[in-house]
Image: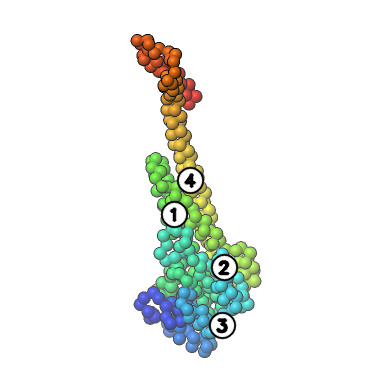
Amino acid sequence: MNSIAGAYGSDEAGLICGYLFDAAAPAPVRAVDSAQAADWLAAGTPPGAYMWLHFNLSHAQAERWLQRHAGLSDLFFETLKEGLHSTRIERADDSLIAVINDVHFEFSFEPSDISTLWISVGPRLVVTARTQPLRSVDALRTAVKAGDAPRSSTELLEHLLRVQADVLVRIVRGVTSRIDDIEDALLAGRLDHKRARLGMLRRVLVRLQRLLAPEPAALFRLLQSPPAWMSEPDAQELRGSTEEFSVVLRDMGALQERIKLLQEEIADNVNEDNNRSLFVLTVVTVLALPINILAGLFGMNVGGIPLAEHKHGFWIVVAIVMTFTAIAAWVAFRKKR
């Protein structure tokens, strides 16, 4: 199978990659560019063949090409412009419109490393569009280049969902490994900045879970009344891929609870350290109270200061101060016990 370009980029129409799937042809998978795709769409579809086109929406010509040649539903272009990014799959006329959130290709466990992938699925054309390089769709692109040829457009969507579930599983494993390291450091008494790291991981999981959790009502309606061109086995496979999503999302919820418990434990340790420091400060203040009082009294320049003429007056005052200091220390430590 020939490659369009050696670099991961887009052509003059914003097409990153395009593939024609035709089981009856000598080559079941063939790479196409935007000009070939436009000619194929204008000529008509051979039975059993369909095309996948992946666009870069940051390219100025991408949306124009889609409006001119792809014949997509108006709902797809409305979805591109709306601000709702929650994961969902809806039916629009005789096609499916999917909004899927995925992590960036260079994912660094930051909440901002998540972007949206817009998908239109029809019997003869699958269009995916994004603004940032995403891991799941790139993994699907790599699998297709290696020879993987889904037999239908619905199966291509199902493959994409399963690839995304695999990416999320690896993210969950990475977060679990980081949490294990933080927990080991906590047990060893090395707090450092672990609370900040836990907070960052928790924000990533919350954002992933909020954006990736599919809308159950829309999916239920779709699977109850699929388009006429979608076969029953394809509908069952699509249902199975969404169930994998649910398993991963439950694992994310469990990780969030674990992070919450670790944050509470770290907060308790910090509070205990603060209480100990406050107790030491209180004891020092109490122990210094007798000498401060006597120093204030004897420092007044007035007549009648006791023991001023006594030859052992200094040591008598020291004894009085030490006595009251010992009593104050006994009272403070007694309350502590």
Crowding at mark 2 (Cα within 10 Å: few <14, some 14-19, many 20+): few
Query: Which residue is the site of mark 4?
Result: 263
Relative to 147, is 281 above or below?
above
Q: Badges 3 and 4: C-beta atoms under 8 Å apart?
A: no
Closer to the eye: label 2 or 3: 2
Q: Which one is earlier in the sequence, the residue at label 1 or at label 4?
A: 1
User: Is any atom of residue 112 visible in this view?
Assistant: yes
Given this view, does label 3 or label 4 mark the residue nearer the observer?
A: 4
Element assignment for label 4? helix
Q: Earlier in the sequence, mark 2 or mark 4?
A: 2
Kind of residue at disc 2: Gly
- Separation of residues labelled 2 and 3 (CA atoms): 23 Å
Residue 90: percent from left, percent from top: 60, 70
Q: Quadrant of the N terminus?
A: bottom left
Query: Which numbered circle lies on residue 71?
Result: 3
Q: Nearer the viewer, mark 1 or mark 2?
A: 2
* Residue 246 shows in the view: no
Residues 42 and 303: in front is 303
Q: Amino acid at mark 4?
A: Gln
Residues under labels 1 and 2: Cα distance? 28 Å
Q: Residue 88 is drawn in which quadrant?
A: bottom right
